[in-house]
Image (cartoon, rainbow, N blue to C red):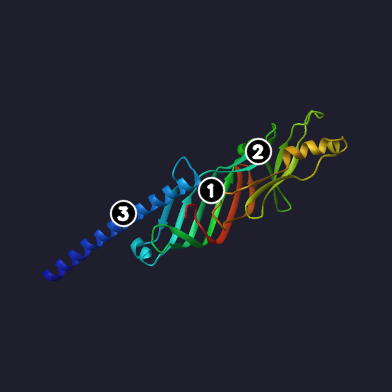
């Protein structure tokens, strides 16, 4: 009986040591991955990276991690000299393959992501003193209200649609030009110059594609997914 108690004590001690070593290893790996993403993307701060699954060391031995979550923070896209900022981009990477030397992540078998755009950032990106606000949904399309500035009209408000195109571009388009503007020479061109924009997101992880855009009173939510997705910096 005494020998059994000693054996159990040893097992518990070694188990605790293994868990401690495993947690130290995963924390080190998370910090290294965050630093690599920060340097490759030119970010001011390192993003939050979380490696899930236990034990971590046996995952490393098999060169496949169950799940890696990354909060990439804000990224920007440019169009016509104006930048559109995504307030937040988070992604979950599943079945993540490590490189042969175990020093970095090669790719993920599949991934999902979510991004957010505030109306303040969309307004700033549109430029020209344009105001963009929540417009609800119509026929399954997420809409916004746009108030462009046209000198020949005292006030004007149009409805626009925000969508994801080509897997990497956020598109803003006015749906219909009001009759009062359409009847005035040059008015429609001036309105569309302020309302119709495409912002291409060059900093997305490779093969992670934008899919769906939903507007809400709090902002614009974009969902994304993909297969064989590479993490930034890998």
Which quadrant, please, contains the N terminus? bottom left
The answer to whether residue 95 is above or below residue 192 is below
Front-most of residues 197 and 132:
197
Q: In terms of depth relative to the viewer, which is nearer, 149 or 216?
A: 149
Q: Nearer the viewer, residue 168 or 139?
A: 168
- Residue 199: give x, y in percent of width and height: 65, 45
Rounded to the nearest whole Å, what is the CA distance between mark 2 and mark 3? Answer: 45 Å
Task: Determine which quarter of the picture holds residue 5.
Answer: bottom left
Disc 1/disc 2 C-alpha distance (Å): 22 Å
Instruction: Name the residue located 39 percent from the left edge and 51 percent from the top edge.
Output: 32
Label 2 or label 3, whichever lies nearer to me, is 2
Q: Where is residue 155 in the image (x, y as percent from the top left)?
A: 77, 30
Residue at the image point whose x is 53% and y is 48% from the top: 89
Q: How crowded is mark 1: few (under 14 residues within 10 Å), some or many (20 or more)?
A: many
Secondary element under disc 3, as helix, strand or loop, is helix
Identify the mark nearer the N-term, 2 or 3: 3
Residue count near mark 2 (Cα–Cα under 10 Å), binned few <14, some 14–19, many ≥20: few
| Residue 213 locus on image (x, y percent) | 64, 51
Do the numbered discs 1 and 3 sit on residues whose CB atoms are within 8 Å? no
Residue bearing mark 1: 89
Residue at x 45% of width, y 57% of height: 68
Choose the circle earlier in sequence order: 1 or 2. Answer: 2
Q: Is mark 2 on a helix, strand or loop?
A: loop
Q: Which of marks 1 and 2 is in front?
A: 2
Say the numbered circle drawn on residue 81: 2
Which residue in the rendered view is the most extreme toward the left? 2
**Element carrying mark 1:** strand
Q: Earlier along the polypeptide chain: callout 1 or callout 3?
A: 3
């Amino acid at each position: 009986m005494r020998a059994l108690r000693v054996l159990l004590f040893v097992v518990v001690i070694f188990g605790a040591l293994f868990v401690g070593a495993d947690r130290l290893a995963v924390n080190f790996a998370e910090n290294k991955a965050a630093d690599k993403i920060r340097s490759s993307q030119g970010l001011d701060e390192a993003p939050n990276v979380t490696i899930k699954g236990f034990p971590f060391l046996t995952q490393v031995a098999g060169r496949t991690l169950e799940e890696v979550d990354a909060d990439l923070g804000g990224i920007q896209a440019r169009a016509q000299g104006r930048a559109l900022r995504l307030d937040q981009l988070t992604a979950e990477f599943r079945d993540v393959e490590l490189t042969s030397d175990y020093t970095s992540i090669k790719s993920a078998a599949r991934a999902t992501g979510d991004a957010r755009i505030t109306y303040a950032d969309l307004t700033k990106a549109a430029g020209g003193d344009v105001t963009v606000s929540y417009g609800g949904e119509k026929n399954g399309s997420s809409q916004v209200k746009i108030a462009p500035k046209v000198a020949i009209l005292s006030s004007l408000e149009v409805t626009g649609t925000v969508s994801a195109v080509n897997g990497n571009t956020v598109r803003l388009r006015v749906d219909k030009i009001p009759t009062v503007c359409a009847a005035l020479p040059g008015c429609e061109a001036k309105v569309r110059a302020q309302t119709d924009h495409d912002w291409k997101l060059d900093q997305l992880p490779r093969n992670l594609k934008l899919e769906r855009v939903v507007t809400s009173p709090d902002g614009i939510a974009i969902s994304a997914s993909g297969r064989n997705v590479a993490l930034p910096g890998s």
